[in-house]
Image: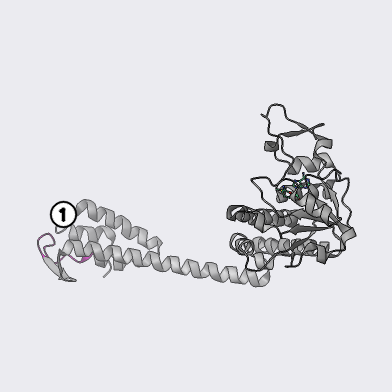
Amino acid sequence: MNMTCREHYALNEENVQPDREQLHDETNNANCMLEHGEPLLEILTTLQIDSDGDCSSSSTKENGIWCSKNVLRKKRHWEKIVAAKKSKRKLEKEKKKAKQAENANAGTNPQQHSKRFLKAITKERVLGAKDTGPRLCVDLSMTMHMSRKEISRLAAQIRRLYGSNKKAAKPFWLYLTGFVEHSLLYDECVRMNDGFINYLINKTENCFLDVFPLEKIIYLTPDADNALKDIDPQKVYVLGGLVDESIQKKLTYHKARENGLQTARLPIPEYMVKNVNLKNFHSEILAINQVFDVLATYLETQSWPDALKAGVPPGKGFLLRDPVK
Ligand SMILES: C[S@@+](CC[C@H](N)C(=O)[O-])C[C@H]1O[C@@H](n2cnc3c(N)ncnc32)[C@H](O)[C@@H]1O
């Protein structure tokens, strides 16, 4: 049946008179469907359903429910529209997937390429530190001095420290010693740190005293008398794996001295002054990831002011003597 929209509309005008506004909408939709690829004739046929009968009075049963033909006609019409849209979306999705697979095979997807490339570069840089970089060890043998909450915070600090090392221009090679598998700290590390098992890091249950020659060890402790002057790639810098909110003073200092180890503190008083605006709170005790940020920045810049600025948070109550421009 060849019929223009206008002819079709005229043919049905009498029967569909009460629904003029609705037919107008549907005719517009019919034109719209043309854009989506559904044959116009099909739409017109749908609209024509009531042309032989009295649509306003007759009714029919569908799925056990009585509906007017008019309602059914509308329902079928919209079902067709929805189905057409669905199949169009599905087709577009399939096309997109095929294109992505094509790009991945050819290695031309710039986003994927750079992500993979950056990951490979980072891995190479971190692994490079295993042979040439200075070594940094976190001594995790003191969990008995910490509460459950402090252990969780330590796991979070290990994650930050590891993240900073991955980003560092000159990374350290990292060790976690005294690290007992399936201890509370271990399980917290696995729970809180994505991909912890695959960290590029040496993990051992052994004590650092059994892992490194004693003369190579410098235990970093806020209670040391000597300030750290430089970072020597031949040495191993040990940090106390401690989060002590109820500060256990000199814990690592005594441990280091008892084992005849060299100790050092960060040169905070040498390069920083107390911020008089802050009330009474001046602490040189940093979290392990903050100490690490100081060391990593120093390694890169060879500047203590830059390094301390990067790692000592303003809340500790210190300012640089000569602010870094
Ligand atoms: C939160 S502190 C623990 C302080 C604890 N009272 C102790 O006896 O070491 C965690 C670790 O970070 C390192 N650290 C923190 N502040 C430091 C500083 N100013 N100088 C050197 N090391 C520091 C130490 O290795 C320390 O054991």
- Identify which residue is drawn at 18% across, 54% down: 19
Is 103 within the magenta? Answer: no
- On the image, the x and y values in percent for residue 89 come to 44, 65
Residue 130 falls in image quadrant:
bottom right
Identity, as a three-letter code, of the amino acid under mark 1: Gln
Is 56 within the magenta? Answer: yes
- On the image, the x and y values in percent for residue 299 come to 84, 50
Observer-nearest of 34 and 81: 81
Q: Which residue range is magenta in the image?
A: 48-58
Observer-nearest of 171 and 1: 171
Instruction: Tell me if mark 1 has few (under 14), some (14-19) or many (20+) residues whose alpha carbon lies within 10 angstroms of its own.
Output: few
Residue 179 falls in image quadrant:
bottom right
**Residue 174 is at least partly visible in this image:** yes
Left or right of 203: which side holds 233? Answer: right
Observer-nearest of 118 and 30: 118
- Identify which residue is drawn at 79% across, 43% down: 307
**Residue 169 is at least partly visible in this image:** no
Mark 1 falls on what kind of element?
helix
Looking at the image, residue 2 lies above or below residue 227: below
- On the image, the x and y values in percent for residue 234 come to 90, 58
- Identify which residue is drawn at 44% across, 68% down: 90
Q: Colour scheme of this structure image?
A: one colour
